[in-house]
Image: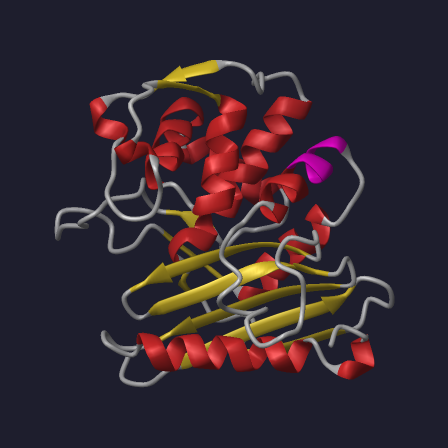
Amino acid sequence: MNAITLAMATRDLRTGEAHGVNEDLELPLASVGKLLLLAEVAMSIEGGILGADEPVELLDDDYCAGSGLLTSLSNRAWTVGDLALLTAAISDNTATNALLRRVGVERVNAAAAALGLSRTRLLDRVREPRGPEHPPTFAIGTAAELVSLAVLVSGEEGWQVLMRGWMRQNTDHSLVPALVRHDPEGGWLANKTGTDDGVRTDVGIMSGRVAYAVLACGPPGSDHELATAVRQAGLALASPERGLQ
C-alpha cells in the first residue's frame, strides 16, 4: 500500500439517503474492530447470557500495552459492564482482551455475521507488539458493513441503547468530528475510533442524524496525512445541509 486509501459510507437516519466511496473495500480497522465485541457483549447482556455485574478476573495474559488504563491500575477484578465501558471510552486493550477471553473471538464473529457483517471480523486478540507469528492485524472490515452496524446501534432495542451509551463515553473526538463544531460532553456523538501505524478509522452516529464509517489506510509514517483525510471526510459529512455544523 503505497498511497493513502480512504473508504467512507454514510446513512441519513431520517431519510435513509446513503453515500459511499470505496465502501466495499476490505481494510484493517485497528480498534474500530472492538465494536463487534461491544455488540456481542451488549446483546448477551440483553439476552441474559452475560450479566453486566458479572466479575471478570484479569489474567496476566490479558494485560496489553497501548491504549488504556488497566495496566496502571491495581484492581484485578472488574465487571463485564466496567470492561465494556473501558473498551468503548478509552479503547482499553487489557479490558478488550479480558472480554474476548470471556466470550471468545468466534462468538464475536458469529454475532457480527448474524447482524449482516460477513466481511467485517476479528482476526485475533489485541497484541502490542504484534509478531510475525500472529495474524497480521486485529480486525478487518468494510465501511459499508460498519455503517450498517452504526445504523443498527441507533435503534431503540435494549442492546442498542446499551451499546450507544457506551459509545457516547468515547473520549476520542480527534478524527471525524475534529473539525465539526460540537460539545464533546454533550452526548452529540456516539463513536469508536481506531489508531495504528498506517491506520485511522472512525465509526459512529452524529447528533442522532447521520451514521458514518470512515476508514483510512496508508504506508507507515503517513499518520498525519491519514488523520487529515479522516477529518476532512468528517467535515464533508457534517455539511450544513444536514444541520450538523
In the image, residue 83 sits, relative to residue 25, either above or below, namely: above
**Magenta residues, dominant SS class:** helix
Magenta span contains residue 124: no
In the image, residue 130 sits, relative to residue 108, either above or below, namely: below
Q: In this view, does 93 lie to the left or right of 209?
A: left
Location of residue 92 in the rendering, given as x and y in whole percent from the top left corner: 38, 41
Q: Which residue lies furthest to the left in this view?
A: 132
**Residue sitting at x 41%, y 67%:** 200
Q: The magenta stretch spans which residues?
A: 158-162
Location of residue 150 in the rendering, given as x and y in whole percent from the top left corner: 65, 54
The N terminus - image quarter: bottom left
Location of residue 181 in the rendering, given as x and y in whole percent from the top left corner: 66, 73
The picture quadrant where one finds residue 210 is bottom right
Could you say which is closer to the camera, residue 148 or residue 232?
Answer: 232
The answer to whether residue 245 is seen in the rendering is yes
Q: In this view, does 134 lie to the left or right of 19?
A: left
In the image, residue 229 sits, relative to residue 72, either above or below, namely: below
The picture quadrant where one finds residue 48 is top right
**Residue sitting at x 33%, y 20%:** 75
Looking at the rendered structure, the number of numbered marks drawn on it comes to 0
Q: Is residue 171 left or right of residue 65?
A: right
The answer to whether residue 109 is seen in the rendering is no
**Residue sitting at x 17%, y 49%:** 129
**Residue sitting at x 71%, y 57%:** 188
Location of residue 235 in the rendering, given as x and y in whole percent from the top left corner: 62, 80
Magenta span contains residue 161: yes
